[in-house]
Image (cartoon, helix red, strand yellow):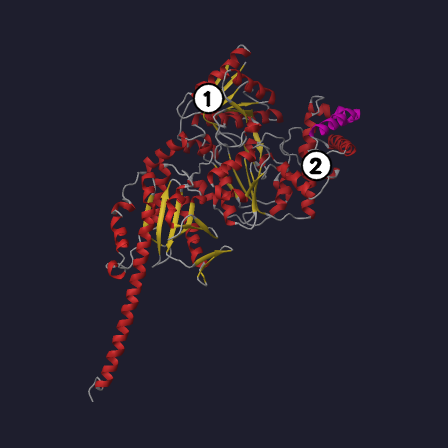
Amino acid sequence: MAAGGSAAQQAQRLSALSASFEREALSAKAEAGRYAAAAIAERKLAHRLAPLLAHGYHLLADRKWPGSRSAQLDLIVVGPSGVWIVDSKHWNDFTIAGGSMFRGDADVTDDVLRLADVANDAESAFAEVGLAPGEVRAVLAMHGHSKRIGEVGPVEVVGADDIHRYLARRGNRLSIGEVERVLTVAMQHFPAYIGPQVTSIPTLIAEPAVQELIDEIPDELFGDDEQLLSEAEVTETLTIAKLAEDIEGWMTFLHPSQAKLVRRTFNGPARIRGSAGTGKTVVGLHRAAYLARMRPDGKVLFTTFVKTLPAVQANLLKRLDPSVTERVEFVNVHSFATRLLRERGIRHNLNGRGATAQWKAAWSALRAPHKDRLAARAGTRDDDYWREEVDSVIKGRGFTTFEQYAECARPGRSIRLNMDDRRAVWALHLDYQGRLRTAGIHDFNDVILLAEKSLERQPFEGYSAVIVDEAQDLSLAMIRMLHHLVGDQQDAFTLIGDGQQSIYPGGYVLSEAGISLAGRGVVLSVNYRNTVEILDFANKTIAATGYVDIDDSTSPADATTDAGIEALESLRRHGHPPVFDHFPTAAEHDAAIVRRVRQAASNDDTSLGDIAVLCDTNYQVKKALALLKTAGVAAINLEDYEGTPVDRVKVGTIKRAKGLEFKAVLLPWTPPLPDSPDPNDERMSRAYRERYVAATRARDRLWMGSC
């Protein structure tokens, strides 16, 4: 018998081998067909997006799927509207329901969500060049469809027929320099994919129109990867573009080091602090947007002390990430507390003026021994210092017994009190509280304490995270109340602020609230806002004062600290030195206000809306508004400003300007401060800090006037 077996057996083997070859050929042909269909789908998609090339967009086709050997991404789009990670599908039989996607009867949700994982991982790479997480979007483009179809988790499903309109609809969110910088990272993070080569598309798919479509797409469609700006050119372009924008655009600018912090994970309550101009609020806003996307089960509460600031912050968030505006709630702390009490049916009657009248009555009725003692300790018969003591130390910390007050430290308070002094203050406090109860009214501290007690008894569900801006201005009871909303969960409670900018009476440290920040504190030390000249002036203003921060650390407010040195060394933008003009008459001073406003507005990169006139009192605010109106200069009270660009000078108190910034700031009716202040004079120290806050609101120009 032949080695190969009988002729019949050989024929059988040949037949089987032939069938195997045929199956492999069919499989190879089908595989080639799939690659060909995918290639055509990608080119169709690129063809749809080609009009965007003329508007500063870049298309990176056939990019490698990070972490995979064989998978590829159809298209990465980098342009003024952000970064888009696009996958295209030729599915006809698909449905989206309840956040899931089905192809026929098969659930393909997990496959779609892989695209979201790519976007999420890419955020870290793009953070290296300052791109906020919200600017990286995952999109599934469905051929044969138009408009927005739905969403699968964070993946947006849109029709490929008009995807170019969808991508461009977000507007110009990145400058030219930012686009070029992000493009460099995109090409590194998503390298070109080299897969199976399709050489005979016409033989597999014989539709002439498809081949014509392929032929009409120019080779230049995907751009020349080598035509990139140098790092120096990118930096210069980025800076020029940002400086020329309206001030609201600048207020949402994110530096690369800040972008990393936006996505950072903290295993418990965290604190972000830094001196003026280091971008704390911007980081907070971007972090709010990031957490809102990552935590769909509850809203993010963004709160602060100043009642008008939440409206501004809400509009800034709408500008930087409109997709999450419904999931981030902006409200000041007192408004939140009163709303909580109202929704829970807890009786309260907030009456600030009535409370002041009851305080005055309690002070007048205070027995002579106690009143004489307190007057002697304060060096005046004025009751203001003692109302601050009751508001910030006793009620601000929620003390209910004299023993609590007798044993407490009083950080930030300049007058040392012995036990008899404290008994006198406590007697004043008890009489004041009794008068409030008799009158049936509450002061602002009472509202906070009532809300805190309610949350202790009945936790509130609905918030996944709380971010507190300008945290140093809140009382201990306010911090405790807000902490009750989310507790010590991961990334749930973030405090943002700077004790150096505290302009309200202090009186506590966070450890009293049982809140530990151990290992979860971040210090931002680089000033991105002010020119060297303005920052130097501001630091010298408070060089002789000190402050006690709420996280148990004491630091001198002086430009020679490590943070101050780093800020000055890293800042390279010089400008006009601050100007301090003294006038012999009020008329000359007031005329100078109008003249300086017009002078600032005459600069090409500054409009009226980029200028602020900041005052010490509400009376001065009214006077400044009247002066500008008489001179025909459009102006708006900061109480009415909501964070959207307006071509009017912004006028308000320094307290009202906290958290804001302007290209040019005028400080009229500014009294000279002593060269050597008394470090034990608490009010004088706050006056210096208030001057520091006012000066650092100015990005480019600062003028002060006195008479």
Residue where numbered disc 2 is placed: 446
Q: Amino acid at mark 1?
A: Pro
Q: Residue furthest left?
A: 2
Helix, strand or loop: magenta stretch: helix
Q: Amino acid at mark 2?
A: Asp
In magenta, the rendered stretch is 352-373
Q: In the image, which is nearer the foreground, mark 1 or mark 2?
A: 2
Q: Secondary structure at mark 1?
A: loop
Q: Is residue 191 visible from the viewing direction of this image? A: no
**Looking at the picture, does residue 54 appear above or below residue 246?**
below
CB of mark 1 within 8 Å of CB of mark 2? no
Crowd tier of the residue under label 2, counting other residues whose Cα lies within 10 Å: few below 14, some 14–19, many 20 or above:
many
Find residue 578 and name its label.
Answer: 1
Q: Is residue 584 left or right of residue 602?
A: right
Q: Is residue 71 visible from the viewing direction of this image? A: yes
The C terminus sits in image quarter:
top right
Q: Position of residue 374 (x, y in %)?
A: 73, 26
